[in-house]
Image (spheres, rainbow, N blue to C red):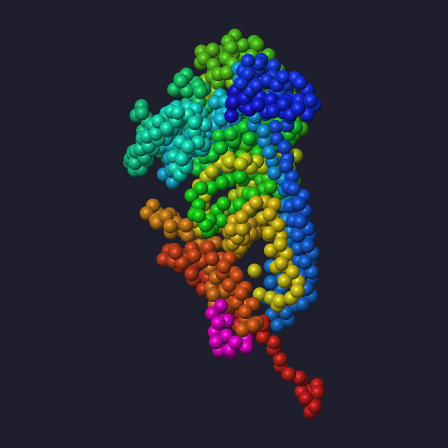
Amino acid sequence: MSFNSSIWEERLCQWRLARERLLRRTGSQEEIPDPSDLGSVDEMELRQPEMDNESRQFLSRKVPIPPSMIYPYRVSVIFRLVILVFFLRYRLTHPVHNAYGLWLASVFCEVWFSISWILDQLPKWQPVNRQTFPERLCMRYNQPGKPSGLASVDVFVSTADPLKESPIVISNTILSILSVDYPAEKVSCYVSDEGAARLTLETLALTCDFARKWVPFCKKFQIEPPSPESYFSQKVDHLKYNPYPTFSKERRLMKRQYEDFKAQINGLITKFQDVPSEGWTMKDGTPWPGNDIKNHLGMMQIIMGHGGPHGSDTRALPQVVYVSREKRPGFHHNTKAGAMNALVRVSALLTNGTYILNLDSDHYINNSRTFLEAMCFLMDPSNQKICFVQFPQRFEGVDANDRYGNHNTIFYDINLKGFDGIQGPFYLGTGCFFYRKALCGYDPSFEQKILNTRWLDLRMKSPSDNHGHYFSDASDESSSSLLIQELNSLEREFPSSFQSMKMCFGQAPLLIASNFVDDDIFSSYATSEEILRAAIHVISCDYEDKTAWGIEVGWIYGSQTGDVLTGLKMHARGWRSVYCMPVRAAFRGSAPINLSDRLTQITYEANIWFMLVVLSIFAHGFLELRWSGVSLQERWRNQQFWVIAGVSSHFFAIFQGLFKVMLGLNTRSSTLMKTHDEDSAVEFYKFKWTSLLILPTTLILINLWAIVAMIFSIVVHGYGSFGPLFAKLFFSSFVIVHLYPFLKGLLVWKHNIPTVVILWSLILASLFCLLWVRLDPFTTRFQGPDAEACGYEC
C-alpha cells in the first residue's frame, strides 16, 4: 500500500465533516469550505496536523473478546471442570469387580482425556483479536517523495523435487511474492533448491521474465490475489468492480501471456522428465553440479534485481536468488531446517533483511498488504519484544464438505487466539515473519556491543559512494581493505565478543559483521568476489560443525517438530509472538487432501454425573462457537479428526517418543507410493502410513461386531432386552460415526489396503472379542452360598 492522494482525499472529507459538525454544535458562523474548493486550499497545511496526529498513534492494538461472550464461556469451563471431578470421583469409587482390568483401563483413559482437555482449555481462557493500521504505518515510514523507511524483508521459499512439487505452483508462489504492495528495493526472495535441479533454476528464470509483465499489471490494477493461477481461476466478475477503462483489454492480454508462460513451464517439465545417461549439462557444456543430488557443490545465482543479469530494467522488482547448498555423503544435512539456516546465512551476506518471511513452495501470498500487516506489529515502537508474527494457514482445493477437516478451523481460529492472549502462538512452519536478531539467538535485552556508527565511519572513509548497491566494483580493493581493517580492529578491541560469535555463527567474518547492523551497509565495502566466496563458504556442508546453528541459532535440529521448537526456543529467551488474522487471508496453500496426510500432520453405566458431563460438553462447545465465529460443521469435522488422530497418529507418536527416549530406537512408517494416474476423487481417501491404520481399523471392526452382536441378541431374546442394549448400540454407533471419514477411506481404497493392516486388525479385534466374551463384564455372576458355612439350612 503506497501513501497516495486517495488516502488524503478520504482524510480531508473526514476532516471537513468533523469540522462541519463541530461548527454547527458551537453555533459558529465561520464559513465552511466546499469539498470542491479543497484543491485550492494549501493541502500540506491541512495534512500536517493530521500526519502529526497519525504518526503518534499505535500501529496495532489488542481487541479483547467482549465480556458478554467470554464470561459465559469461562463459566461453562468451570462448570464442566467441577462436573468432571465428581464424575471421575464416582468412577474411582465404583469399580467393576467382575472386569477389574477393563475398568482400570477405562478409568485410565478417562483421566488421560480429562487432563488433555484441561491442558487444551488453559490457553483459551483469555483469547484476543488484533487490529492493524497499515495507513498509519505508511504515513510514518513511507511518505511520497521521501526514501522509504520501511524495514527490509527477506523471503525464504524451500523446494525439494520439481517433479513432485509442481513448477507451476512454485512459480505462482514466487510471482505473488514479487507483487506484494511493498517497496521493491526492500524485498528479496531466496529460493532453496534441496533437489539441486536444473529444472528449478530454469523455472525461476522464466518466472522472473514473466514477472516483468505480471508485477506492473498487479500494481496498476491492485490485483488480488497476486498469484496468477488463483486470480484467473476465480469465478467472479472482475470487470464489475474495476473502474479502469483499459482493464478489460489488459486483463485479456495478461491472461493470454500467462497461458503462454504455463506452456513454457510445461515444456520445461517435458524436457527435464527423462534424465540423460551422462547427466545434464549447462549452456557452456560443463556438467550440471547437481546431477548427483546427494553429492554436489553449493550453488548460488542472483537471477533478478539489485545488480542481477537483467540490468536496470528490473530495479523496480524485488531481488530473486537461487541457492542450493552443498551436499556430501556422511554429513547430516537436517532437511528443511538445514536449508532454512543456509538461507539465513546467505541472505545475511547479500541483503541482511531486518525481518525474514518463510513460505512453503505451495503457499502463495493471497493478500498483497500482508507485509504491511506484519510490519504494523514488528515496527511498532510499543512492541519491542516481538520475535515473530504468525499468520493462520488457509487452504484451497478442499472438498465442499471438508470431510477431513483440512481447514482445521478450531486450531487456527480458536486455539491460536487463546495462545495469543498469553505469550503468543506457536511457529507453524510457514507464513511467519521473523525478527532476524531473535532467530539468530539474541534475547530481547541484547545490546549492540559494536555500534552502527562504526560502519558509518567506515562509509565516510570509503573513496567511492556505493550506498544502495550490494556489490562494489570488483577492481575496487581499497574499500575491501578498509572493511578487513575495520573487522581486524574490532576483533582486537572486543576479542571475547568476536570469539564467542565465531563459536556461534562460524568462521565467516562477513557473516559476523552482519550481526552488528540491521541492514546491508557492510556489504557495500566488499567486492563481489568476496561476497561470492563467503556465500559459497556458508552453504558448505561442514560450515555448521562446532557452531550453535540448529542448537541455539536459527531453525532447531533434532526433532520432527523442529518448527514448534524453534518458536518455543525464542519464547524461552523472553520474546513473545503475535497472531495476525487479517480479514482477507494473508496466505493460501494446498491442503493435504488424502487420509494419511491428514493424520500425519472413548460404555458405562448411565448416571447423573455422566449426563451432566455430556450436557456440559454441549454447552461448552456452543459457547466456544459463539465467541470464535466457527461454524458447527467445522467443529464437527475437528471433533472427528480429534478422535481419529487420537487413536492413530497421536497414539503412535507417544510410543515412538518412548522408544526413542528409553531404547534409542527410531521407529518409521512404511508408505504406499502415489501413482500419477490416480482418480482425483479416490485421492481424497488415500492412505500411506500403515502403522497408523491398524488401531482405527481394529476399533471399527470391534464396534461393527458389537452392533451385530446386539442386534442378534435383540432378535433372540426379544424386545425385553432392548432397553439396556440401546445404550450400547448408541455408543458403538457414536464411535463409528466419529471414525466415518476413516471408514469411508477404507471402503473407497479397499483393493489397496496393505495386507499387514488387515491381518493385524483382525487379530487384535478377535483377541479383544474373545477376551470380552471370556470376562463378560456386564453379566452378574452368582455362585450360590457355601454349603459348609450354612449347613442344611442352605
Residue 354 spot, x, y in % from top left: 56, 25
Would you identify the image quadrant in which residue 513 lies? Answer: top right
Q: Nearer the viewer, residue 661 or 790?
A: 790
For the point 64% across and 51% down, the residue is 118
Residue 646 spot, x, y in % from top left: 54, 54
Magenta region includes residue 32: no
Residue 450 spot, x, y in % from top left: 63, 19
Q: Residue furthest bottom?
A: 792
Q: Is residue 735 above or below residue 622?
A: below
Would you identify the image quadrant in which residue 141 lies? Answer: top right
For the point 62% across and 67% down, the residue is 606
Q: Is residue 489 above or below residue 271?
A: above
Q: Nearer the viewer, residue 2 or 685?
A: 2
For the point 59% across and 31% down, the residue is 132
Q: Quadrant of the C terminus?
A: bottom right
Left or right of residue 645, residue 782 in this image = right
Q: Nearer the viewer, residue 347 or 710?
A: 710
Magenta region includes residue 708: yes
Residue 457 spot, x, y in % from top left: 59, 12
Magenta stretch, main secondary structure class: helix
Left or right of residue 716, residue 680 in this image = left
| Residue 505 appearing in the image | no
Q: Which residues are magenta?
A: 707-721
Tag count:
0
For the point 57% across and 45% down, the residue is 629
